[in-house]
Image (tube, rainbow, N blue to C red):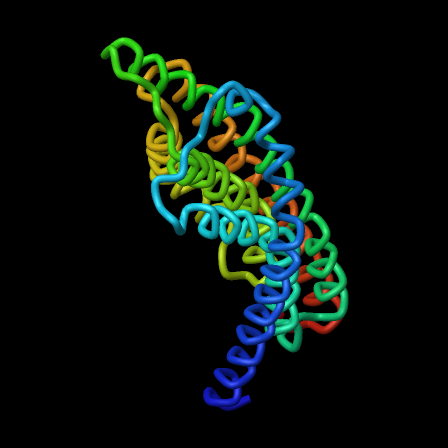
Amino acid sequence: MPLFEHLGELRKRIIAVLVVLALGLVAGLICADPVYRYLMEQPPVNEMALHAFSLWDGIGIYMKFAFVIALIPVVPFAFYQLWSFVKPALKPQEQRAALRYVPYAVVMFLIGLSFSYFIVLPMAFSFTTKVSRHLGLEETYGITQYFTFMFNIIIPISLLFELPLLIMFLTMLRIVTPATLRKMRRVAYFIMIVIGVTITPPDVVSDILVSIPLVVLYEVSVFLSARIYRRQQRADARFEEDYGVQRI
């Protein structure tokens, strides 16, 4: 297709994702109350008295919960729309293989959500409260401050857990190769460690506990990329043997 038709197709895909996001926000607002009440019964917040410092705090919290809940259907749908956009450029077997990634997007997002909520968040909260008590500060937390603190940790980590799927998809499109990923390993490690240090308390144990899984995610991405690349190389070799020309 000409460039403008490609842009028009991309525009349709983006609009579809935004529509699903809007519907997800509606469903999120419905589910926000039971999710909020469940989280309020979990430690450490169940032992705290949260306060509202603004008339908009309650509404803001509901919207943040709605957005996080909406991400659960939006992430796989966005992957599906990306697959649909590049589908004409894929061979039939590549189309089927790429489509299988869509359900895993939900699984990886939920794994990232669990890891960030049950492991990273308690470490970060424990460290910050210890510092406050060491300084002799009276702990008075606002509901917006607490849940903003929580969402700022769990959302980036949950999205980072989509990295292996994204790398596999880009490898299938022949945009990246395992060799490129290996060359970028030092830069990628640095970025992962910076992210781990940024979202965790400034102590070595917490930094290591978060940075190592992020680095492992990158290595898993490289491994999966290499598997797909080898399959592509074997398919190209068979194509050359059968037709005597190099596949583009």
Residue 236 in percent (x, y) is at 66, 62
Number of numbered discs visible in the structure rendering: 0
Q: Which quadrant, please, contains the N terminus?
A: bottom right
Residue 101 in percent (x, y) is at 69, 54
Residue drawn at point x = 37 percent, y = 30 percent: 193
Tell me: residue 216, above or below residue 224.
above
Tell me: residue 78, above or below residue 103.
below
Tell me: residue 15, above or below residue 112.
below
Residue drawn at point x = 55 percent, y = 57 percent: 170
Q: Quadrant of residue 226?
A: top right
State the residue in front, 52 or 64.
52
Do we see residue 205 in this rendering? Answer: yes
Q: Quadrant of residue 247?
A: bottom right
Residue drawn at point x = 57 percent, y = 25 percent: 118
Tell me: residue 95, above or below residue 45.
below
Image side of residue 136 versus residue 159, left or right: left
Image side of residue 88 versus residue 134, left or right: right
State the residue in front, 208 or 177.
208
Residue 88 in percent (x, y) is at 65, 77
Residue drawn at point x = 48 percent, y = 27 percent: 121
Q: Which quadrant, please, contains the C terminus?
A: bottom right
Q: Residue furthest left?
A: 135
Image side of residue 52 versus residue 33, left or right: left
State the residue in front, 111 or 46.
46
Q: Residue furthest front?
A: 55
Do we see residue 185 in this rendering? Answer: no
